[in-house]
Image (cartoon, grey):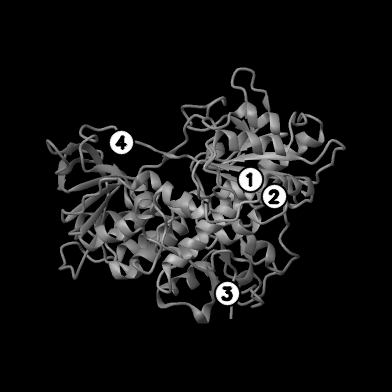
Amino acid sequence: MPHVITQSCCSDGSCVYACPVNCIHPSPDEPGFATAEMLYIDPVACVDCGACVSACPVGAIAPDSKLEPQQLPFIELNASFYPKREGKLPPTSKLAPVLEAPMIHPRPSGPLTVAIVGSGPAAMYAADELLTQKGVRVNVFEKLPTPYGLVRAGVAPDHQTTKRVTWLFDRTARTSGFTFYLNVEVGAHVSHAELMAHHHAVLYAVGAPNDRRLDVEGMGLPGCGTATELVAWINGHPDCTTLPVDLSHERVVIVGNGNVALDVARILTSDPDVLARTDISDQGLAALRDSRVQEVVIAARRGPAQSAFTLPELIGLTATHEVVLDTADHDLVLRDLACETDPLTRNKLEILSKLPDASAPSAGPRIRLAYRLTPQRVLGESRVEGMAFAVTGTDELRSLEAGLILTSIGYRGKPIRDLPFDDDAGVVPNDAGRVLDPGSETAVPGTYVAGWIKRGPTGFIGTNKSCAAQTVAELVADYNAGRLADPSSGSAALDRLVRGRQPDVVDGAGWKAIDTAEIARGGDSRPRDKFTTIPEMLDAAASAPTPSLGRRLLAGLRR
């Protein structure tokens, strides 16, 4: 009974290291790991031990006999990654090579102390890597009162299994030596120089928070927005609670066809009663209950073979929602399928080739995938009325009526105060995580990056694990070599500085109080009912017992 990885795979590699026969690939030490859409279990080599099930942080692995009907395609998908062997067992090996955490050489002056700016996956994986050894101190700074970045606010609410990865982050946050400074904005409440004075190193894991913008006429009209903003609004991000989302028209157009576009289309065409059992925001749920949307068109500039969404997301979408193609796009799919040799792309095309035609009657809200449409301008005078496209590579023009236009064409990093920035790439210039001065191309002492601000917006949640591990290895190497200066002030001085600048700082106990209150608000029907404004979050955090300064200092001395 081989086990199977399903669409909720986060690709962090934990299952790879747990497998005793090395039957899960690509592994983090293999070239294809960083760009893999998912991981795959070899059904012939699998010994049915279940170690991978326990290791998976998002519940994405199950025996093939226990899959839901919509997950059955993943049996063949996992198997197709491996060559045919005519029934012969492959040679098994030892556990996949584990990338060991770098050994820290302690100094008499005190423990290695690192500030991490940001609290998303890259930040938390970096903290976990550092705290594998005793005596290390990690202080995590986050501008919101709640941690975990896009896992909390960027994962669609109906993907609750993906959000389970936060239990790993909660475990890290409970580790001795870890401290949260939430509701503290680096650059506003405390500067980079001040962090450097209190730490051996500062590691920025702030992601790529900006959307790439579509530069066409009319994009400033009311009714235009981005898919990532809408996901944040649906998730109750406090910066997006006032986002104007008009669902009064029968059609929404999304420009771009990556996974975020599929997420938004799926949510906009889902049964609100189903979404009511998730952690969707109350305002998002209310808007969807009143929605008149009957069709979401996902428009891509290129053809079907170049679709940006992943195969697992396509399988999941077509299993639960009505997805259609125009006749002309069906012809494009068949043309691409006839000449495509890449197995993964062929799998996508085969699924697309079986989709219903858009001309057929629809039983309810549907999603239409549209190809070779290059945006020309937004239609409308005072607000959005539709979008005009050119058929890519031709002079033919087409237009689609719509009441809401969303772009989903990627993320982009933004400059960080006091750090160099590569405006073309949208990242902080770096070498394996060491921040580089662009003039001299030498490392900026004690300053590091991980995640999307390091490598650009690529990969999945778990991809940040190996990315963060690489940065931490470079940081520790610099510390061991004596290239990182000792802090000029201790943890007590840092605590006084932060609380003096930001009295509303939220610590780990405050976050726990927010978390507990949200779960309680969800009751028996929802995983949680989120607070969507900062004052609400701070009120909940204030219910946590606050240790005295003396107790905080004593705790710092014990770490």
Of residue 381 and residue 466, the one placed in the foreground of this image is 381
Label 3 environment density (alpha carbons within 10 Å; few <14, some 14–19, many ≥20): many
- Vertical comparison of 366 with 497: above or below: below
Residue in view at x 24 percent, y 39 percent: 375
Of residue 324 and residue 191, the one placed in the foreground of this image is 191
- What residue did someone put label 3 on? 3
Residue in view at x 54 percent, y 32 percent: 189
Amino acid marked by disc 2: Glu
Query: Marks 2 and 1: in contact by CB < 8 Å?
Result: yes
**Helix, strand, or loop for circle 3?**
strand
Distance between the Cα atoms at labels 1 and 3? Answer: 28 Å
- What residue did someone put label 2 on? 129
Distance between the Cα atoms at labels 2 and 4? Answer: 38 Å
Residue 177: x and y in percent read 72, 49
Judge depth for marks 2 and 3 and give the one in front. 2
Q: In the rendered structure, which disc, 2 or 3, sits on the residue that comes first in sequence?
A: 3
Distance between the Cα atoms at labels 4 and 3? Answer: 43 Å
Amino acid marked by disc 1: Ala
Residue in view at x 15 percent, y 53 percent: 249
Label 4 environment density (alpha carbons within 10 Å; few <14, some 14–19, many ≥20): some
- What residue did someone put label 4 on? 214
Amino acid marked by disc 4: Leu
